[in-house]
Image (cartoon, helix red, strand yellow):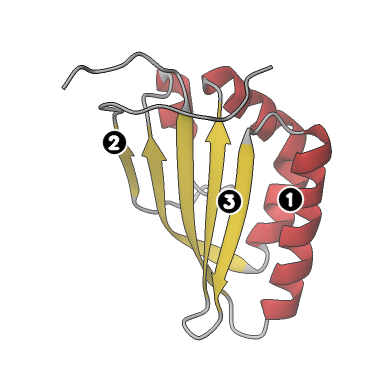
Amino acid sequence: MEITDSGTLLFRNTMRVTDGHLDGFRRAIARAVAFAHEHGPQLMVEVFLDEERMLAHSFQLYRDSEAIRTHWRLSDPYIREVMEHCTVQHFEVFGAPDHDIVAALGAPDGGSFPVTISPRLAGFSRLETH
């Protein structure tokens, strides 16, 4: 199979919602997603919640590493608000982000969590490009 060339990056963030913070988490996620929809560079954002296990999964699709830099610059207050209600359990990057993106991956408070990066092998997208 031929490796195709694409700068597209997919993030999967698995978060554990802090006990007693479910409502605050829901509100913070709703504000963050609304802001990203209005102002962010993401091609797609989806957040799923497993209430029984108190785990949330956020998926974000970016055109390239520059879009991630833009997202981080614009969304920092929203990211921090979400993080008041959860901890990151695992962060997965699918694609090949620039080295500075990889170096910057970590908790906003300086803590750490497992990060995996899986380079792209092959694929396609039916998403419209602008």
Q: Residue reaching furthest left?
A: 1
Is 14 drawn above or below residue 97 in the view shown?
below
Which residue in the protein does label 1 denote?
33
- Using the image as rendered, state which of residue 46 and residue 76 is in the foreground: 46
Q: Is residue 110 visible?
A: yes
In primary-sequence order, the first of circles 2 and 1 is: 1
Is 10 drawn above or below residue 121 in the view shown?
below
In primary-sequence order, the first of circles 1 and 3 is: 1
The picture quadrant where one finds residue 81 is bottom right
- Secondary structure under tag 2 reads strand
Dot 1 amino acid type: Val
Dot 2 amino acid type: Ser
- Secondary structure under tag 3 reads loop
Query: What residue do we see at 50% from left, 86% from top?
Result: 52
Q: In this view, does 80 lie to the left or right of 93?
A: right
- Secondary structure under tag 1 reads helix
The residue mark sitting in front, 3 or 2, is 2
Position of the N terminus, as image quadrant, is top left
- Using the image as rendered, state which of residue 6 and residue 79 is in the foreground: 6
Which residue in the protein does label 3 denote?
109
